[in-house]
Amino acid sequence: MNQNLINQYQITLQNKVLNWSSGDEIFKSIETNNRYLNEFIDSWSVEEMDEWLLPYLDQVINGTLQEYDTGSETITILIKQDLTYFLIDGVGTNYPTIPTQDFKEICLGWKEFLLTPPLNGTKVS
């Protein structure tokens, strides 16, 4: 992920330690200045991104698909070639957006972070 994108969206990628009764584990998290982006991206695994997000994102950017909608547990998005819309309740049609190319780069950065040791769920002694 390039530094301009990190600065623009105030992106922080962190390895946090969660304390469970069964032992401590690494939990990877992303925080940005866009709470809808945080909620959406944080719940995606590498496998899910590879199967249900990134291929379709590329197809929309390349013009093969006109649009694509998908969601996480709490947020649904609509990906169009120029903008990605966070379809949330209570805003009428004033949906928050992010440039689709920025969204793709953030997703790829998140995926790369998830693949970097220590991996999500790693036990900590």
Image (spheres, helix red, strand yellow):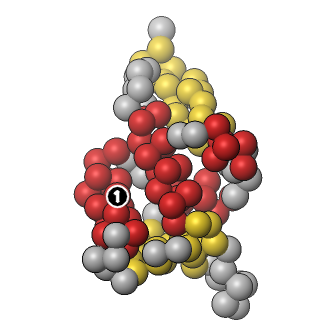
Query: Residue at coordinates 71% horizontally, 85% vertically from top-left?
Result: 94
Task: State whether residue 27 appears in this view.
Answer: yes
Percent x, y of residue 32 = 68, 48
Q: In this view, does 84 lie above or below 109?
A: below
Nearest the viewer among 71 and 116 is: 116
Query: Residue at coordinates 60% horizontally, 35% vertically from top-left?
Result: 13
Q: Please tell me in which quadrant of the rendered image residue 116 appears.
A: top left
Percent x, y of residue 49 = 35, 53
Query: Residue at coordinates 28% horizontally, 77% vertically from top-left?
Result: 64
Query: What amino acid type should be assigned to the residue bearing mark 1?
Result: Leu
Find the residue positioned furthest to the top. 125
Q: Is residue 29 above or below residue 21?
A: below
9 vs 111, left or right, is: right
Query: Residue at coordinates 47% horizontally, 77% vertically from top-left?
Result: 80
Task: State whether residue 19 appears in this view.
Answer: no
Q: Give the secondary structure at mark 1.
A: helix
Percent x, y of residue 15 = 56, 27
Percent x, y of residue 47 = 28, 48
Q: Residue under label 1, please give it.
A: 54
Find the residue positioned furthest to the bottom. 92
